[in-house]
Every structure is written in structure tokens, then in C-alpha cells.
Amino acid sequence: MADMHPIQLFFSSHHPLAKKVEATFEGSVGGTVYVQIAAPSDLVQRPEDNTLHSGFATIILDSIMGGAVMGTLTQVMPIATIGLSMHHLRRATAGEKLTGKAVCTGTHNDVAYVTGELLGADGTPVAIASGTFMLGTRGTSIRNKTTAPETTESRI
Amino acid sequence: MKPLSPAEQWLAISITDDPDLFVLDFQEHHIGNPIIRSVHGGVVGALIECAAEKALINALKEKGLPSEVEVTTASIDYLRVTKDAPLYARVNIVRIARRIAFLDVKVWQDNEELPVSRGSCTLRILDTTNV
């Protein structure tokens, strides 16, 4: 388990969201991760042509981009998405085999900068994205102890 | 009324009396971080995209225009941590042009004045008259 990439841990876990997506970790090189995904029929938006909602790509890319960031950390710490920019080029079809790729380009002032793409089996893009992730966000203790108004204490 | 798609059922999105206000009923499969039980950022993004689509479809129908739309771009800011509770999304239609539309979406949980996320979406309006 200790040698598993964070993405591999996420998609192989009993996490209810991860179980929904048939995803296989393909490997990582530096801050780049590759994942194979089968587009789930539960997220079909248009039954007429069996295409998925764009939110599917948003969920996948947020997950693997976060995983790419986790893979670059030298010590485990909580992270949080602070910005996500999604471009949806086409809708994935249910059952379609997709490749997800995320690259953590760099980190500056505790903010990680990431790009991601979701491609069809023939290489045609389904979605491309860029995102920013805050490193070292606060854990549950802050939320559990905080009774003061949220405006005085923030996790990010 | 068009029945909810499988994706909308999975997201557990419901409409309200306000055509620009939508609710995502919390489901266990929406969890992103099981330790703090926050909603997955992608699920919040999916809510923003879905709410923008639905609000635009409502607006186009009112004008008697074709109502097939697709999200082209969504830019999402995550302002606060979420919790395992319903999310509310209010859509503000910025502009509806001939082929595209621009919409802003605000998402909150307890208090509309303390949004957890905001989104800026561009949607393509598809001409279905000759299909």
C-alpha cells in the first residue's frame, strides 16, 4: 500500500465515487499520471445517443489532477482544489474507454499548478482542464473545534 | 416535464419553484474526502454545469427558442470547504447571444451569503430546427 500512487489508492479504494468509475492507474512519471477509465452508464445525460454529462469529465479531471499533485509531495498533507477551468470538447459515450492524463507543472507559494486532459481511445479530446490546488490545508480538527462564524477561520 | 437523466439522478439534482435555483441533495457517493466528509470538487463543478444548462434551457423555452445546449467552458472557484449536506445553486444569466450564452453560478450550503463555490460558464446553444 505504501508504494501505491495516491491516484491508485483513490481508484482502488472503497470510496463510493471511485467505485463508480472503472479506472486503472497506468503509471506516473514525475508529476505526470496516466489513468484508463471506462465511461460509466450511470452518468448518461442524453439517453438518445448514450452520451455522458460534462460533469463526468469534471469529476474525473479534478480527481486525477489532485492525484498528480499528491504524487509530487514529499510528505503527505491535505490539499484542496481552489480553481478549476474546464473545456468540454465533446461528450464521452457510455462504455467508451478513455485515457486521463494530469501534469503537475509546478508549485509556488503552496499552490500547485496542474493541467489535465481526457482523451478517447482514438486520441480525440473529450475535455482539457487546468487547475490550482492549495497545499497543506487544515484538517478536521479545525472544523470540529470551530464554533465561531466561518468568516473568522478558513481551511484554505 | 422531461424526466431526469441518469446523470441528473446520480447527481440528485432537483428543481425548485425558482427557475434559476437548483438543489443537489447530498448522497454518500458525492463524498470527495471521506475524512472530513466534504463533497467532491468535481461534483460541485458538475452541479454548476448542470444548473447552468437547466437555467439556460428554461430561459430559451420562455423565448420559444431551440433548447438544446452544451457546456463549452466552466471556470470554477472553490471558496470554502463543503460538508455532507445539500448544495444550492443559483444561476445568473449574464448574456444569451445567438449561438452561445454566458452564465454565472453561485453555490452555497448553509447561507447564500457564504458561498462555497462560484462558477462562470459558457454554453453553446445548438440549432435543432433542421435536425
Image: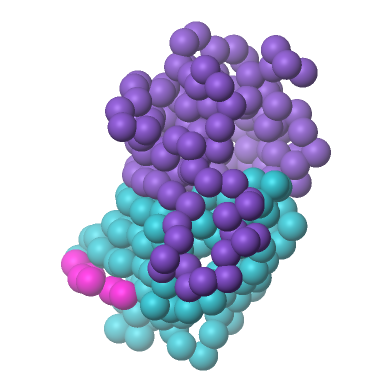
Chain colours: A purple, B cyan
Relative side of A139 to A62, left or right: right
Name of the residue lying farthest toward the top: A29
Quarter of the image with the N terminus of chain A is top right
Relative side of A113 to A39, left or right: left
Above or below, A46 against A94 in this view is: below
**How far across and down, in percent of the image, does residue A99 sit?**
54, 24
**How far across and down, in percent of the image, does residue A140 sit?**
63, 51
Q: Residue at x 62, y 61 (%)?
A: A145
Above or below, B75 against A112 in this view is: below
Q: Residue at x 75, y 42 (%)?
A: A15
Relative side of A123 to B127, left or right: right
Q: Residue at x 68, y 32 (%)?
A: A10
Q: Dividing the picture into quarters, in which one does residue A151 lie?
A: bottom left
Q: Residue at x 54, y 85 (%)?
A: B16
Q: Dividing the picture into quarters, in which one does residue B117 lie?
A: bottom left
**How far across and down, in percent of the image, does residue B11 sit?**
63, 61
Name of the residue lying farthest toward the right: A14
> Residue B80 or A63: which is nearer the viewer?
B80
Count up the numbered dots. Answer: 0
Residue B129 seen by the camera: no
Above or below, B33 against A33 in this view is: below
Q: Is residue B72 magenta?
A: no
**How far across and down, in percent of the image, does residue A153 sit?**
45, 61
> Residue A24 or B115: which is nearer the viewer?
B115
> Residue B70 or A20: which is nearer the viewer?
A20
Residue A106 seen by the camera: yes
Assign the magenta stretch its main secondary structure: strand
The magenta stretch is B92-97
